[in-house]
Amino acid sequence: MKLRKTNSTPRLKKGGDPSEFGLQSSPTASSSISPNKRTKSLDRTTGAKTPRKSNRKLNFEDNNVDENFKPFHDMEDLENRMDMLLTNFFKSGKSRAKKANDDESEDEDIEQDENVGDEISTKISRKTTQGQLKCDLSSLKICFENIDNFLPGSINERVANVEKEFPKWTEWIAIGKFNLLVHGIGSKYALLTNYAQTELADYSYIMVEGFRASVNAKSILQAIDTLLNLNVKSSRLDVVSWARLISRGVTEKQTDVFIVVHNIDGTGLREPTHQQALVELAKCSFLHFVASIDHVNATLVWDENTAAAFRWLRINISTMRCYKQELLAGDSKLLGLNSNSAVRAHTFASLEAIWQSLTSNARKTLQKLAECFVQENDSIDFFDFYQTVKAEFLANSEIALKKILVEFNDHHLIRQNGNIISLSIDKDLLISYLENKFENE
């Protein structure tokens, strides 16, 4: 069976910027799903495209690294610093807890002493202020960045050999109609990202960070719909029915799309209905999954029929890499992380969907809000913003403005704490989207 090639003029020229379509071309901290649109189709007869060498290397540099930080000299130096970091952290926790307990016991003794008068006892409060323990995340990130540099040479050689097999991965997908499932010890994030950026550069693909709790099947469906301009009406449809319509639309377009999923066993994708929606996508001959799993019981997500429908070709590769992205994207009381309070994971696709649902007045208010946040770093006052929009004739009363802000809050664009307004979305992403939107208009 020969390949179905697309002879139509590409909407995005090779090497172009997908932001022309309101999409992002590479994963960012604020983007959980990153599309890449190309018109090349798979060769299902002779296999994958001709392998080519790539000098691209992933850059995981931390922009917030302390300038005074001294580089690691060797593995022993790294281990000593990690040990010192963790020891100081837990020692500080024990000392604070001990001090709090001593203060509390001392207060109880004083209050129970019959010789102590009421005046003295009222001055002593049993409430003790326990400082919240915070992990030094900046130092921990530096350790995460550097720890992979001290892996044994045999492991790095093994990963390098796997990367040389990338063309075969695409060949297996093209000829065998398989979907690839990568598993093993260590993070596969860098491995799959490298595969997408080098081997799939000429194909349409979306990158999904499934380890983020906010990512689910609906996010993936919306990304595919926006990438190929399918314009599938999803209102009043369950997620499985929506997936069927997306599959049908992709088949009509006859465009191969790769779905690269980091952790298809993520918390937002484990629901049976969401996995069934992904199965509907896997049934489409033009949609191809390249996914990773890390949970020890990940395979329990699928029953026998579901696993057969995915047509997984399992690839075992233990990279032994640090789970940096996966750890920092989750919830951890020890590390002081909380995904619910973190920046909301929006993409250009989700912002476009929100934009279409807003009224003309709400759109102008959102634009004015973004302009205010350009001047103010963290937050703005409600009454100051009200005076701004009132002068622009966007709201004639505080109640009218509050209604618009409630809608923004429902879309997870902002959050309010009393009269203080702050962004729930990455500021740079919002500003970039609005600039692109008004330039096209």
Image (cartoon, rainbow, N blue to C red):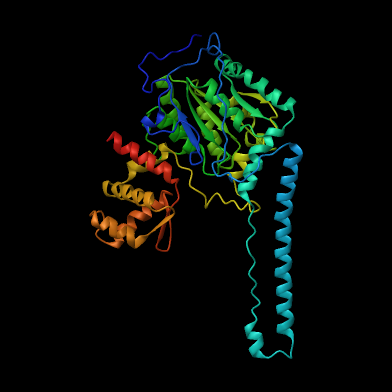
Q: Residue 87: where, in percent of width, then height?
A: 74, 53
Instruction: State the residue at coordinates (50%, 20%).
Output: 285
Instruction: Report the front residue among 120 and 146.
Output: 146
How many numbered marks are there? 0
The x, y position of residue 272, in whole percent, is 57, 38
Location of residue 375 in the rendering, given as x and y in whole percent from the top left corner: 37, 51
Q: Quadrant of residue 325?
A: top right
Q: Residue at x 41, y 49 (%)?
A: 413
Q: Is residue 82 left or right of residue 223?
A: right
Quadrant, the C terminus: top left
Let me know if residue 149 appears in the view. yes
Q: In the shown orientation, is residue 343 left or right of residue 357?
A: right
Q: Is residue 306 visible?
A: no
- In the image, what residue occupies the spot 60% across and 24% down? 180
Residue at position x 34%, y 36% from top?
A: 436
In this rendering, the answer to whether 70 lies above or below 334 is: above
**Quarter holding residue 434:** top left
42 versus 185 height, above or below: above
Between 73 and 126, the residue placed more toward the observer is 73
In the displayed structure, 105 sits above or below 141; it is below
Whole-percent x, y for residue 411 in the image: 41, 48
